[in-house]
Image (cartoon, helix red, strand yellow):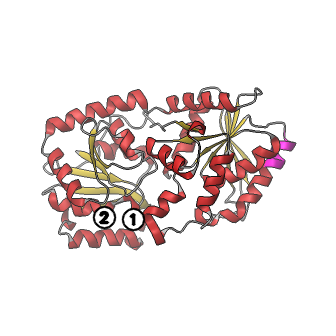
């Protein structure tokens, strides 16, 4: 499950726990099964028939957004249930939500989960997104009732996009502290060799190449990468093979390990097995990995980009380094692995920071207050697209 999917699932559950009536609308990608799937009291997932009932890559979904929005309009007009607020996640969901919201007089809140202009700036010609994305995001930012930013860097990017500061509300995500906590089992390891752990999807912008290059400056430590695809599919994955080839050329192949994807419930055991968790993306809209690591009491070394610059307090809960700088990353890792007291201090401070600032309950409380501010006084219900 990707970061955006985790976010929607967690915040929807937290809102339902707080007494809101939440319906999550997602495109149907399988012809079997019911239209509406009750998840628990106050939370229902609705599978919208828009486009083919089969999986479609995210960058190929734009042609079906209009149909999605028209279906929402008909559904909310004809059904007894109509939301007080539409909270759209991702820009294409925003287009669909705005289509229905404007026709029915329902206010719309937008969370982007990453901006096309930022993606294009860092990926250039490798950006496979629709060419009109940035324009649509600009229109959305000016048309919706409120935009939710997840970090200070995103606030600045939204203002650059043309969104008025008064229309932006900063609401950071949380971390599931029932799963991610210091107590519990850890994955077995060689205690005589320090472990550096990195977690995430195997895509170039996550910076795994920089982590491998950095390991040249961290003698004797092992580097473990946990992330999609699942282990059995790793031998056929082109990017996984590129990482293995890079480890070989850097002379660290004997202490580099690719695990593949693991169930979310098992991630905490991997975090607890590490001496330090490294997150080295080129850019990152927010990034849940450092939060999960800190919730497990593990120190973090991270690129000082996007949400990581908010969640990791440099010199207090971890170390921030420039992105795409393997030398600086290696220096930070070597220094931290060589200082047990600093690691313990970072781990304790990181855990305190998570408990004070990054719970999904807190996120839901902030969003609930925002919904009240923009909604017409009807029912305490939200639709999430």
Residue 349 horizontal/vertical position (percent) = 28, 31
Which sits in the foreground, 208 or 233? 208
Do the residues under discs 2 and 1 have CB atoms within 8 angstroms? yes
Choose the circle earlier in sequence order: 2 or 1. Answer: 1
Residue 322 horizontal/vertical position (percent) = 29, 53
Q: Residue at x 24, y 51 (%)?
A: 196
In the figure, 66 relative to 277: above or below?
below
Q: Quadrant of residue 261?
A: bottom left
Residue 84 visible in the displayed image: yes
Q: CA distance from mark 2 to mark 1?
A: 8 Å
Which sits in the foreground, 234 or 338? 338
Q: Residue at x 71, y 62 (%)?
A: 64
| Magenta residue span | 73-79
Residue 260 visible in the displayed image: no
Residue holding disc 1? 204
Which sits in the foreground, 22 or 185? 22
């Amino acid at each position: 499950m990707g970061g955006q999917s985790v976010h929607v699932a967690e915040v929807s559950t937290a809102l339902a726990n707080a007494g809101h009536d939440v319906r999550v609308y997602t495109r149907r990608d399988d012809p079997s099964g019911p239209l509406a799937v009750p998840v628990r009291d106050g939370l229902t997932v609705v599978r919208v028939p828009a486009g083919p009932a089969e999986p479609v890559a995210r960058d190929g979904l734009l042609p079906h957004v209009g149909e999605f929005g028209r279906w929402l309009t008909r559904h909310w007009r004809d059904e007894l249930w109509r939301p007080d607020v539409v909270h759209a996640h991702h820009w294409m969901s925003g287009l669909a939500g705005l289509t229905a919201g404007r026709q029915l007089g329902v206010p719309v809140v937008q969370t982007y989960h990453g901006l096309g202009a930022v993606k294009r700036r860092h990926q250039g010609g490798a950006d496979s997104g629709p060419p009109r994305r940035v324009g649509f995001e600009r229109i959305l930012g000016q048309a919706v009732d409120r935009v939710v930013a997840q970090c200070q860097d995103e606030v600045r990017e939204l203002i650059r996009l043309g969104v008025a500061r008064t229309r932006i509300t900063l609401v950071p995500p949380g971390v599931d502290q029932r799963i991610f906590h210091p107590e519990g089992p850890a994955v077995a390891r060689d205690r005589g060799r320090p472990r550096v752990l990195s977690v995430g999807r195997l895509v170039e912008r996550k910076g795994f190449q920089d982590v491998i290059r950095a390991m040249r400056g961290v003698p004797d430590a092992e580097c473990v990468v946990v992330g999609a695809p699942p282990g059995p599919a790793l031998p056929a994955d082109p990017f996984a093979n590129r990482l293995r080839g890079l480890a070989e050329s850097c002379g660290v192949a004997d202490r580099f390990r690719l695990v593949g994807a693991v169930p979310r419930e098992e991630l905490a055991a991997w975090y607890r097995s590490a001496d330090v968790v490294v997150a080295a993306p080129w850019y990152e809209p927010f990034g849940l990995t450092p939060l999960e690591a800190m919730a497990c009491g593990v120190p973090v070394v991270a690129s000082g980009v996007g949400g990581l610059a908010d969640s990791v307090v440099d010199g207090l809960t971890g170390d921030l380094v420039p992105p795409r700088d393997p030398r600086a990353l290696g220096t930070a890792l070597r220094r931290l692995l060589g200082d047990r007291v600093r690691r313990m201090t970072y781990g304790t401070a990181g855990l305190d920071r998570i408990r004070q600032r990054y719970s999904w309950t807190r996120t839901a409380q902030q969003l609930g207050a925002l919904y009240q501010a923009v909604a017409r006084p009807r029912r305490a219900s939200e639709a999430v697209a």
